[in-house]
């Protein structure tokens, strides 16, 4: 086996698959995925050999800012969609989730080195805000025409082991785009000017995924009766506090939130990695990595949760417009602005968080999770058609969701 395949990119998908010397089954699977999306995949990435189908589910019962919304979620993990439906049902009568959002402001950074006096350079750059705005806005007339464009310029002097550097931030209203390409283009074009004005050497010119000027805050209030009473609320509060004070717990707590966020982001063709790096960096903003959500007891014994995080998502640009399924998913949600998409995604993250906290603090996560996971285990053991449910039900009833047991049961059934 060699990874040096000269001219791989010049082959078509069928030829690429032949070059990989796969088993007939694997080759067939991959070429089947290529049939409907082959050409699109070819345009989206290099050396495409097919597509990777991920289940797409729809979360029901969700209500955000007084409006019901059906939420498509693309995820390979069992129980993620079910958990959102279940959590959303428990707050539906209390009007679901409400949100607040900042303007969609993205930051791009320009790093400037070798400065004689970085503080003088900083003042010089800040004095040029008007020129910087003109230069950046000129690069994206569509964005400016629609009401976006450069909003602010910031600069910081940062000490480092390789000397002081000046870091300039351009802050751009990117409207309905995720905005990475938009701000990167501006940062790259601005860099030579900054070098000339400061006498320094510019190096990196790229957006920051810590999009902390593009925040969404989601809030939910559960009636104690709807969630199983006061004891459940108290257990959830103890569980949530654990994630606030302990990074080991916070990492898993936030992973649960991202189960929901990344699934909606993927379903709408958004950049899941950008959201995840932004969320985790934001979770560590006070120096300790903490829970992204906070929970407290509200009036009349209610349970109130809030989730605040950066939300760099778009409905134009990147893959969002090019991918027909992403477009269909926006249609399911009846979403026409990136602002509404950001709010719905944050709401889903908070509902997902509630679902995980409640399960963990009461019956444990495995009960619900394993019932769904049992089907995956049955499939992995070779079960097909109605064998899948028979084997999965058996695994759950035995309380042992294991592949070896699934294989034994399958052999028994077939015998
Ligand atoms: P883009 O450049 O494809 O589209 C944005 C452009 O669309 C704007 O510049 C504007 O000219 C135009 N536009 C039309 N109607 C608009 C509207 N209503 N609102 C806003 N803009 C409108 O895409 P983008 O959003 O700038 O970049 C997103 C892509 O960049 C994603 O695919 C992402 O994966 C990728 N990316 C990410 C990173 C990172 O996160 N670190 C780095 C580089 C690239």
Image: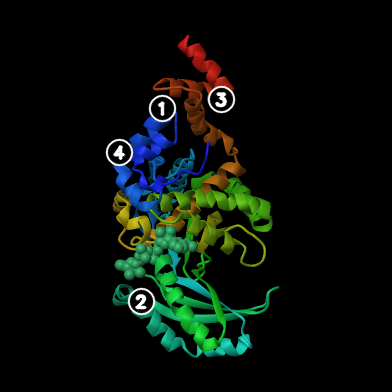
Q: How far apart in space, not on screen, are marks 2 and 4 (Cα)?
A: 38 Å
Residue 20: x %, y % from top left: 44, 36
Q: Nearer the viewer, residue 137 or 86?
A: 137
Q: Are marks 2 and 3 in contact (CB under 8 Å)?
A: no
Q: Residue at x 35, y 35 (%)?
A: 31
Report the residue marked by disc 4.
35
Q: Nearer the viewer, residue 311 or 83?
A: 311
Report the residue marked by disc 1.
25
Assign a secondary structure to mark 2.
Answer: helix
Report the residue marked by disc 3.
403
**Is residue 83 depicted above or below 177 in this figure?**
above
Report whether 336 appears left or right of 97.
left
Number of the label disc, if any, that sits on residue 75: none
Report the residue marked by disc 2.
139
**Of label 2 and label 3, which has the lower sequence position?**
2
Q: Are marks 1 and 4 in contact (CB under 8 Å)?
A: no
Residue 37: x %, y % from top left: 31, 44
């Amino acid at each position: 086996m060699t990874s040096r395949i000269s001219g791989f990119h010049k082959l078509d998908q069928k030829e690429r698959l032949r070059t990989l010397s796969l088993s007939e089954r694997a080759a067939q699977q991959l070429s089947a995925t290529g049939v409907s999306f082959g050409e699109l995949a070819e345009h989206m990435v290099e050396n495409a050999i097919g597509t990777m189908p991920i289940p797409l589910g729809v979360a029901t019962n969700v209500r955000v800012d007084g409006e019901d919304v059906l939420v498509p979620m693309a995820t390979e993990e069992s129980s993620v969609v079910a958990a959102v439906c279940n959590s959303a049902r428990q707050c539906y009568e209390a009007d679901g989730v409400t949100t607040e959002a900042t303007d969609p402001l993205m930051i791009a950074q320009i790093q400037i080195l070798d400065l004689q006096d970085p503080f003088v350079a900083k003042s010089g750059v800040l004095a040029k805000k008007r020129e910087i705005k003109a230069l950046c806005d000129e690069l994206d007339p569509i964005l400016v025409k629609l009401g976006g464009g450069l909003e602010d310029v910031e600069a910081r002097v940062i000490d480092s082991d390789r000397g002081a550097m000046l870091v300039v931030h351009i802050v751009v209203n990117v409207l309905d785009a995720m905005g990475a390409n938009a701000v990167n283009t501006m940062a790259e074009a601005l860099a030579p000017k900054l070098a000339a004005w400061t006498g320094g050497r510019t190096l990196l010119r790229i957006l920051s995924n810590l999009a902390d000027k593009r925040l969404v805050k989601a809030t939910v209030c559960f009636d104690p009766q709807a969630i199983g009473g006061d004891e459940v609320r108290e257990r959830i509060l103890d569980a949530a506090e654990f994630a606030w004070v302990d990074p080991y717990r916070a990492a898993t707590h936030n992973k649960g939130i991202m189960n929901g966020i990344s699934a909606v982001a993927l379903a709408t063709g958004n950049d899941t990695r950008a959201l995840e790096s932004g969320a985790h960096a934001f979770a560590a903003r006070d120096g300790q990595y903490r829970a992204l959500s906070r929970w407290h007891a509200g009036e009349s014994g209610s349970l109130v949760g809030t989730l605040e995080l950066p939300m760099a998502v778009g409905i134009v640009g990147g893959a969002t417009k090019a991918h027909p399924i992403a477009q269909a998913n926006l249609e399911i949600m009846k979403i026409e602005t990136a602002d509404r998409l950001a709010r719905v995604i944050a709401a889903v993250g908070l509902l997902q968080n509630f679902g995980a906290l409640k399960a963990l603090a009461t019956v444990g996560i495995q009960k619900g999770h394993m019932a769904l996971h049992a089907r995956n285990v049955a499939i992995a053991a070779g079960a097909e058609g109605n064998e899948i449910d028979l084997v999965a039900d058996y695994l759950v009833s035995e309380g042992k969701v294991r592949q070896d047991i699934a294989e034994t049961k399958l052999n028994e059934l077939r015998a």
